Image (cartoon, rainbow, N blue to C red):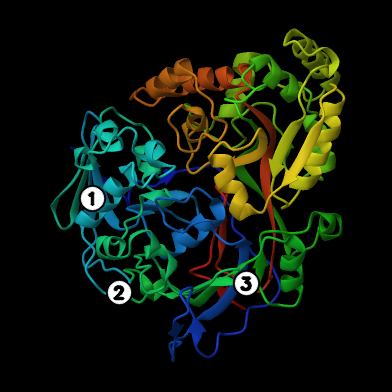
Amino acid sequence: MKKKSLFLVAIMVSSLILSACGGNKAAEPSKGATTAANGETTAPKSGTAGLDLAVQVGPDPETIDPALNSAADSANMIMHAFETLLIVDKDNKIVPGQAESYEVSDDGLTYTFHLRDGLKWSDGTPLTANDFVFSWKRLSDPNVAAPYAEDMLGYVKGYQEAAAGNIDALGVSAPDDKTFVVELSVPCVYFIKIVTHATMVPVQKASVEANGEQWSLKPETYISNGPLKMIEWVPGSHVTFTKNENYWNADKVTINTLKFVLMEDANAAYSAYRTGEVAMIKDVPTEEIPSLQGNEEFHVAPNVGVSYLDFNNQKEPFTNPDVRKALSLAIDRDYVSNTVMQGIGAPAGNFVPQGVSDAESGTYFEDVTRKNNGGDFFNIKNHEEDLKKAKELLAKAGYPDGKGFPVVEYMTNDAGHNKAVAEYLQNCWKELGVNMDIKIVEWGTFAPTRRAGDYLTARDAWSLDYDDPSNLLNLLKSTSGNNSAQYKNPELDKLLDEANATLDVKEHYAKLHEAENMILEDAAIAPLNYRNEFWLQNTKLKGTWYSPFGYWFFQYATME
């Protein structure tokens, strides 16, 4: 085995090294008793030093069960409450988390993680390697139906048997309390990046088994192992965390309480920011953006992500690839990014966004795609050419000038530029003779409805969880729990499996380029723009950072 000390080997996840600062004023310290989500009252701790901070990163979470979550706003909460074996630091390097070191066998099939001494859960009970065994097996359990299960565990030995119901077949074990062993069925050149994902955290067996699906809903049962622990959840209002005194690095945590104020309406969030109720907001009203440009409180930073449209590939008329491609080519991506979305982001020439690495050090996947293909898939600078092709394809599909084409329903939630984009698409597709109705749904309903495939077309977006294009392209695998487009293509499945099962890094990326081309040629989805994140933050708030993978970190925050 090759010994790898994580203090010596720090792996760059992205070349984007970002930090965040700016804002309004800190929230007032919480006073008096608090009421938990179940109505029980919890007295506040006294004599606790540190900052009491309130922020807004999204609405009511659909779930904060790490195995069930697939949303970035919920992951922001999960990553403050829990910690994985390896973590990503403020410089976007992989460093020790619950594991202080790890080893990889020469054939790349066995990973051995060595846990820190004295790890504990937030309730003070010991945390051992068996907790990771339980948690990873739970993630693979078909009865849990974790959307990320295959993405995270698909290359672990025995996953197919586990996904079929025999979870003990999963190749994870604990030879002793401090050693966690993972056996892969095939090599995976980016496996340590997967290990940092929020779904890969441990959850406490005793709490999960005693409380079932309700374990993540109450502070007293939401036992965690990260820098913070939950003390209050008032649905529709806020979720509050406090410093976890049993965290191995608790001495470095500067937060006393971190209050996630739950708001879906950007205007309400902006009002809360201006009055000082919160010191940072993720959702800024789009109409305010022009006046905020140049303001030191307003931040725009690259997000390694892409916004796109889902066509429900299993419903007519979108079972026809010519229909999908026609509606995709009809979109003027330059206009969407620079006019509708006011320059926040860049038009998507392909699917995999900017900032994702390629095989050679210092190269990027998008640049190699452009070189390989002799340009972008979408003609950003000459949209008329794409529109001409769109009309030809629609006629080929049997709908000349849109005649006979059914009314399309487009589902979206009303956040950021989503409604404005929907209205643009309505006008855009009208040029093809296609009529579209807009259906606006609140986030709590929108996400599960889209995932279940109960729609015709819908907005979607993905921020990569780690620096490998497979994390995005795997969404379109037939068996992916995040395949909201309901796309089924055995050829793509085979290509992605081959790409992800090789130790040859060049072969890995070459096959991923083939996969991206296949997705675009078949118009499985319709890319719109490469995302930027924009937010407001108090200029006195320091010690926080933003990850280009869509997360903010507040556990080491201070207020000047």
Q: Which element carries disc 2, helix, strand or loop? A: loop
- Where residue 531 appears, as percent x and y from the top left, is 67, 42
- Where residue 119 appears, as percent x and y from the top left, is 25, 66
Between 297 and 234, the residue placed more toward the observer is: 234
Q: Which of the numbered marks, if any, corresponds to residue 541?
A: 3
Q: CA distance from mark 1 to mark 2?
A: 20 Å
Residue at x 84%, y 56% (from the top left corner)? 287
Residue 201 vs residue 17: left or right? Answer: left
**Between disc 2 and disc 3, whose residue precedes?**
2
Q: Is residue 305 above or below residue 240?
A: above
Q: Are marks 1 and 2 in contact (CB under 8 Å)?
A: no
Q: Which of the numbered marks, if any, corresponds to residue 379?
A: none
Under mark 2, the amino acid is: Asp
Which quadrant does the C terminus fall into?
bottom right
Which quadrant does the N terminus fall into?
top left
Q: CA distance from mark 2 to mark 3?
A: 30 Å
Q: Are marks 2 and 3 in contact (CB under 8 Å)?
A: no
- Disc 3: CA contacts within 10 A as few (<14), some (14-19) or many (>=20): many
**Between disc 3 and disc 1, whose residue precedes?**
1
Among the 4 quarters of the image, the one containing residue 234: bottom right
Q: CA distance from mark 3 to mark 1?
A: 39 Å
Residue at x 77%, y 31% (from the top left corner)? 333
Among the 4 quarters of the image, the one containing residue 285: bottom right
Among the 4 quarters of the image, the one containing residue 305: top right
Under mark 3, the amino acid is: Leu
Q: Which residue is mark 1?
A: 133
Q: Which of the numbered marks, if any, corresponds to residue 123?
A: 2
- Disc 1: CA contacts within 10 A as few (<14), some (14-19) or many (>=20): many
Residue 415 vs residue 485: left or right? Answer: right
Taking the image as drawn, is residue 270 in sight? yes
